[in-house]
Amino acid sequence: MFSFCTDPSVLSDRPWMACYLTTGKHMSIYYSVFTVLLLLAITAPVALAFGFGGATAARSSFAPLRWFGKSYIAIVRGVPDIAFFLFFVIALDQGIEYLRHKALCRDWTEPVRQGNDFVVCQAAKMPLGDAPQWVHETYGFSLAVLTFAIVFGAFAANVLFGAMRAVPRAQLETAEAYGMSQRQTFWRVLVPQMWVFALPGLSNLWMVLIKATPLLFLLGVEDIVYWARELGGTKTSRFTDYPHGDWRMWYFLALLVFYLIFTRISEIVLDRLMKRLTHGQATAGGEAQRKAAA
Amino acid sequence: MKTLFLTTAAIAMTATLALADGHGKTVRMGTEGAYPPYNFINDAGEVDGFERELGDELCKRAELTCEWVTNEWDSIIPNLVSGNYDTIIAGMSITDERDEVIDFTQNYTLPDPSAYLVASPDADIAGGVVAAQTNTIQAAFIAESGATLVEFATPEETIAAVKNGEADAVLADKAFLSPIEADDPDLMFMEQEELIGGGIGMGLRESDGELRDKFDAAIQSMKDDGSLNALLDKWEIGGSF
């Protein structure tokens, strides 16, 4: 990266460090920080949408929809994250390929399962075998986002389901007394008021989601934990210009600081959001705000 | 007119499909990227090492387009079998257990002696604690011997275990351990070495016989013209054909 980096072995500590921290390999770990942030930025709203859908389904008056909502919440919440991640991603990937195989390669006579092998025709591969590496990575990343969204959506659904029930019944009855339809009551009275009850639970989920991002590596996405382990490992002088001992501790310490700073910022933002949502609500918090202002 | 158009489209589709099955295919080479000199990630963040050079040469000779992917050692066989990549080229010794699940090409290294790396010359390798990477021939070997086996997911952790005293020795391929021994004054080799495994080969799905034959022929041609031996020498891996 810098012009003085041509022969790192003669450099003093500071320039050596500057060169070391800007190798192509280190760029990968900085890049993976953005991968993690991008994952959070996409997963959080999608999971919230899944949660909202799940909660609405679970309190629906139409029985099959209610069963679907309730079983979604119960099943996903009851399975360990890691097991779900390992099972679901493989099952989803093979499911997609199997369906594409059936649709695209009708004249294929060999079985899809041959002993241990899962064999589909080339055209059914997801992504296609000749697709460039970034397509494979994007596909893996999308599978990861979907899996995270389903898992965290189930928890969010449970939180929102509780929050919807926490809205005082009198509010809904008043709305009905004013002649609002069920749909109007839901969107105009229930939904705006439930967020304040949901936020503590949702903020908790957000924190867990941030900390769960290292699970990405299970899904084949090279995240910061993978790179920290790879970069921190002992490097001998034969295979690198920057030999060093076992530095994994320092890399993991950096990760720890990164996650701490990130969760701290989240806490501050969530606190502000809570204050804003409490404003004018018929809750203890809202009442306290009103008294303080008066 | 419409039928004609549809038929043409259908023919065009089948033509591309046939093409995709034949030449357009990219062979994805799966490796671990954590086992120098066989394979590792270099300073630029790319896969490098003996197997990178070997693999690129094999692909050239077999007239294939190849692409490199890294995968954890632990799940390297399951991910091959489920089709995430097409070959394993990751310093994997040919063994009967693995051969039941996947297919191997002929070996491209001779059985490399496995060495014990220890922190003190009087370490007890016969009855003490010996570290090895999970699912390796070395781990299987120690499990059979009288020593206590501790397994780790990555080669890095096996070395760390010896340095912090958790294990008395680490058993691994000598070519992997030599550069580490040379750099670290606290570590040394035991005289005793073990000759295990049947050499390293490339792993492929059992249903992929055609691809296996192509790589097999390419390896044979590299053995015949001596270029494989030159590569082995360059990366200081023991034995030549």
Image (tube, rainbow, N blue to C red):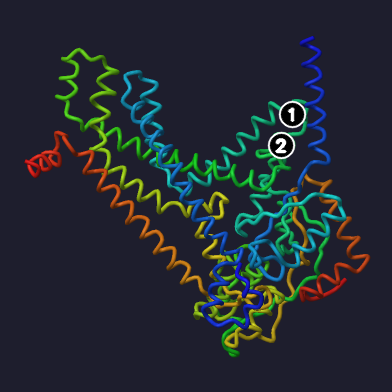
Q: Residue at horizontal 69%, vertical 26%?
A: A103
Where does label 1 land, which residue?
A105
User: Judging from the image, what secondary structure is the residue with disc 1 in?
Assistant: loop
| Residue B215, percent from left and from top | 84, 54
Q: Is residue A64 left or right of residue A267?
A: right
Work out how far the residue at label 1 is from the one at label 2, CA to CA, in angstroms. 9 Å
| Residue A106, percent from left and from top | 74, 25
Front-most of B101 and B240? B240
Which mark is on residue A120? Answer: 2
Chain at tag 2: A
Which mark is on residue A200? Answer: none
Front-most of B86 and A245? A245
Q: Residue at horizontal 57%, vertical 72%?
A: A20
Dot 1, how many residues are within 10 Å of its Cα: few (below 14), some (14-19), or many (20+)? some
Mark 1 touches mark 2? (CB < 8 Å): yes
Farthest residue, direction top: B1
User: Judging from the image, what secondary structure is the residue with disc 2 in?
Assistant: loop
* Amino acid type assigned to the residue bearing label 1 in the image: Cys
* Amino acid type assigned to the residue bearing label 2 in the image: Val
Residue B16 placement: quadrant: top right
